[in-house]
Image (cartoon, rainbow, N blue to C red):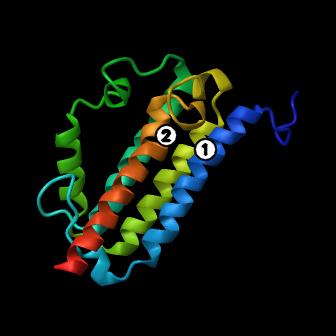
Amino acid sequence: MSDPAVDVTTPDQRAAIGALEREWHDLDEWLRSLDDRDLDRPVFGEGPGWRVRDMIPHLAWWQELAGRVAEKIAREGGAPDQRGSRAFVGILLSTDEQNAATHEAWRQRPMADRWKRWLEAHSRMMAAVRALRADQLLGGDGPEGLQLHFAVPGVIHLQRHRHDIEEALKETTTT
């Protein structure tokens, strides 16, 4: 019987997992430094009526999706095909439909609920990707060699929306 305390990850897995953690923690720290006025500023890129605060459950949803994908891969094998991560886990909504549904479900919720969701989604994703073998996590075109179905919600999507938020904060302070 193997000792669960023994780390069986490869150096490449640890680097990739570290990249996921760093990207999230950097964004988390920055988002939490914003005041209520900043959180209420309009942000562009996802649709009309979105505010900075709306990006938090949006990003959380995509991290949870990555967690669900990793859990399914660990349980059943396989990986998302050209139809993408949503189809892999049985979600039939398009990206725009999913984003609109998430926005509608969360737009009136208090920040405490949003922060909780953000942390829970990231924790789920990280627990799930840590359970994967190196060949299930790595070998893709994402940062640190991550498969794109983890790199996009775990790094690339966070970077893209941080940029969107930074632009929205600049835009509203210069007008």
Q: Which residue is under mark 1? A: 127
Residue 143's tag is none
Tag count: 2
Query: How far across and how far down the image is residue 149, in percent?
Result: 44, 31
3D distance between C-alphas at marks 2 and 1: 8 Å
Query: How far across and how far down the image is residue 40, in percent?
Result: 24, 76
Quadrant of res 77? top right
Residues under numbered marks 2 and 1 in contact, where contact means CB atoms less than 8 Å apart: yes
- Which part of the image, by quadrant, shows the C terminus? bottom left
Image: 22 above or below 64: below
Q: Which residue is under mark 2? A: 67
* Residue beneath the point at 32% across and 27% down: 90
Query: How far across and how far down the image is residue 109, in percent?
Result: 27, 69
Amino acid under disc 2: Gly
* Residue beneath the point at 36% across and 49% down: 61
* Residue beneath the point at 18% across and 57% down: 104
